[in-house]
Image (tube, rainbow, N blue to C red):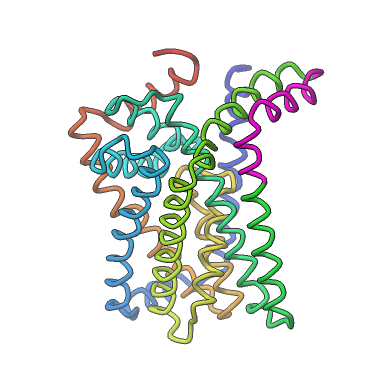
Amino acid sequence: MKTFFQKSKRWLPGTIISIILIGVILNAVDIPKTINALLEANYRLLLIAGMLNILWLMVRTKVWQTLLKDIPSYKDTFITTSEGYLLNNFLPFRLGELGRAFLLSRKTPLSFAEIIPTVFVERIFDLIISAAILLTALPYIAQTEGTAQIAYIIGGLVLLAIIILYLLAHNQEWALSFFDKITTRAPKINKLGGELVKSLLNGLTVFTDGWLFLRFILWMLLNWAIAIVQYTLIITAFFPQATLIWGMFGIGAAAFGGAIPSLPGAIGTLEAAIAGSLTLLSDDASSALAVALVVRLFNYTFSGIVGIYGLTTEGETLSGIYQQLMDFRKGGS
């Protein structure tokens, strides 16, 4: 019983959050109206958005391959990226991030320890860019004055974050020494956090190669630009009055909704973030939920097909990978 409660501390909070949000959503929307919105959507725009989703996945693969210094083949990186999203959609604890590093280490000369820092760096930049997109859209949504000045401030903060990461990359010994100093009185934090910080700093070596860093940033910005256009098209399929700002606000909210503890695949939190943000703009919760459901469908379909193909050809199953990852986290093989 004690073991059950110890384990539940990890998955129970996210489960509760997802269930509560699903209940809130179902209480706020009119399901028949949501179904009607899905039937009357502009399917031409949704088809284009679907094609952009495939392009997004291809560019996202290039982002990760660039961080990996082009050592893995594009095919291996593409399949493994898709496998990672598939694992995230169905396994708890965002094991897809750990899983794709684990799976790629089997296909390339790179070890898990060399791959996992690149996943951290990718996610850090996702967080920085998504925050910048959301904060840039907010003033326009709120129709406040000084939107240009706020955009400049956000741009400055993003630049500052990149400069800090750059300095850390070039002063890794100092950063590790500083972390060790401030956590000396907390052995557990020192041990666990020290490994995490060391792994992160290893990933930041991208900053020590100017051309590599430039290519990474360009691919990352292109990837997010595609995502903004895709979200705008999906939203416009249900709300013809939508603008690019709606797409920016929606994708920014979705990024943070997906980061909240939840059931696998951000069930409940993703829908609440997208539907909530669009309800603020349109006052139509039912159609806003339809947008969220289409986003969910796209997230499952395209990466899912490639991910299932990859796991099948490699003789793996979701349950098998889950057990291997849990054993790996415990120090097993």
Please tell me which residue lies in front, 39 or 129.
129
The answer to whether 80 is drawn above or below residue 252 in the figure is: above
Report the quarter where the N terminus lies.
top right
On-image quarter of the C terminus: top left
209 sits to left or right of 201: left
Residue 170 image point, x, y percent: 62, 36
The residue most toward the front is 210
* Residue 88 falls inside the magenta stretch: no
Residues drawn in magenta? 164-185
Q: Is residue 12 left or right of residue 289?
A: right
> Taking 206 as reference, is 13 left or right?
right
**Residue at left offset 59%, top offset 17%:** 3
Closer-to-camera residue (36/195): 195
Residue drawn 42% across the image and 52% down it:
215
Name which quarter of the figure residue 153 lies in. Answer: bottom right
The residue at the point 33 percent across, 40 percent down is 70
Q: Nearer the viewer, residue 69 or 220?
A: 69
The spot of residue 164 in percent (x, y) is 67, 45
Query: Looking at the image, is 147 positioned above or below residue 174?
Result: below
Q: Residue 72: x and y, percent? A: 29, 35
